[in-house]
Image (spheres, rainbow, N blue to C red):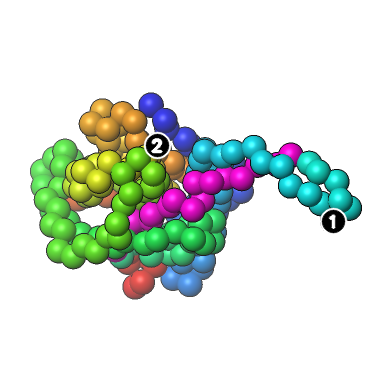
């Protein structure tokens, strides 16, 4: 189960600002961008690379590495909450091609904590994914019941990429278990695993509605 919890002090410092209800929209977005960049670098450390030989300006040959898979990245931007996170990811993967998926979940306020949410994908534009070659990174800052992510994964798995990465900021324990039991080979990067969901399907303690916090 390739689960990476990126809970180093700097990421937790940024997450704390995101969680704080007094953080305004501009700083919320800036901090999401920062996390996107950091999480992107963490993902880059797991990509395939080759040992190469280069020559320095002093005419000395030395060995180095070339992360060849930096050329084979497709980022899927789940609108709208993932926009600032993807802005950060693009700093780590400037050559990435980008797809967008717009999904909405039906608001609920049931008597119990939901096990899944009704999700509609109403727009989708994904570049060609080269089977066995491209690494697809699906970005969604909040994974609650994982209903949206499972719908997106259904689409992406069909293209048979080399690897699928999910990048989130806060994931619920329930959502992570749901994803990894259905797709055990997916690489899942998150900053925090929060313990609970409320009856509306929000993560607790969470950070609220990531789309509203970023865009008002
Ligand atoms: N989406 C959000 O923006 N926040 C949550 O807590 C859950 C889903």
Q: Which residues are magenta?
A: 63-79
Element under label 2?
Answer: strand
**What residue lies at 31% left-to-right and 29% top-to-bottom?**
184
Which is more toward the observer, 169 or 113? 169
Residue 89: percent from the left, percent from the top? Answer: 48, 57
- Compared to 4, does 54 lie above or below? below
Q: Earlier in the sequence, mark 1 or mark 2?
A: 1
Point 78% across, 41% down: residue: 62
Asked whether 73 falls inside the magenta stretch, the response is yes
Residue shown at the point (49%, 60%) measured from the top left: 95
Residue 82: percent from the left, percent from the top? Answer: 36, 60
Figure quadrant of the N terminus? top left
**Residue 78: numbered disc:** none
What numbered label is drawn on residue 187?
2
Mark 1 vs mark 2, CA separation in Å? 39 Å
Q: Secondary structure at mark 1?
A: loop
For disc 1, the marked residue is 57
Q: Is mark 1 within 8 Å of ligand 1?
A: no
Count of numbered circles in the view:
2
Give residue 85's quadrant in the image: bottom left
Give the x, y percent position of residue 25.
Answer: 44, 70
């Amino acid at each position: 189960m390739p689960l990476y919890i990126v809970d180093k002090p700097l990421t937790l410092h940024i997450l704390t600002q995101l969680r704080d209800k007094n953080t305004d929209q501009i700083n919320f977005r800036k901090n999401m961008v920062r996390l996107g960049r950091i999480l992107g670098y963490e993902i880059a450390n797991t990509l395939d690379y080759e040992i190469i030989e280069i020559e320095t300006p002093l005419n000395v040959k030395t060995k180095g590495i070339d992360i060849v898979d930096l050329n084979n990245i497709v980022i899927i931007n789940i609108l709208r909450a993932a926009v600032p996170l993807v802005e950060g990811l693009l700093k780590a993967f400037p050559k990435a091609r980008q797809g967008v998926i717009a999904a909405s979940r039906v608001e609920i306020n049931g008597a119990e904590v939901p096990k899944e949410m009704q999700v509609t994908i109403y727009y989708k534009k994904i570049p060609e994914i080269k089977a066995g070659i491209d690494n697809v990174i699906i970005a969604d800052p909040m994974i609650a019941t994982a209903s949206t992510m499972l719908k997106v994964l259904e689409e992406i798995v069909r293209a048979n990429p080399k690897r699928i990465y999910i990048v989130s900021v806060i994931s619920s324990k329930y959502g992570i278990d749901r994803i990894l039991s259905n797709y055990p080979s997916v690489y899942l990067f998150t900053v925090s695993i929060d313990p609970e969901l409320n009856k509306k399907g929000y993560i607790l303690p969470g950070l609220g509605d990531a789309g509203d916090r970023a865009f008002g």
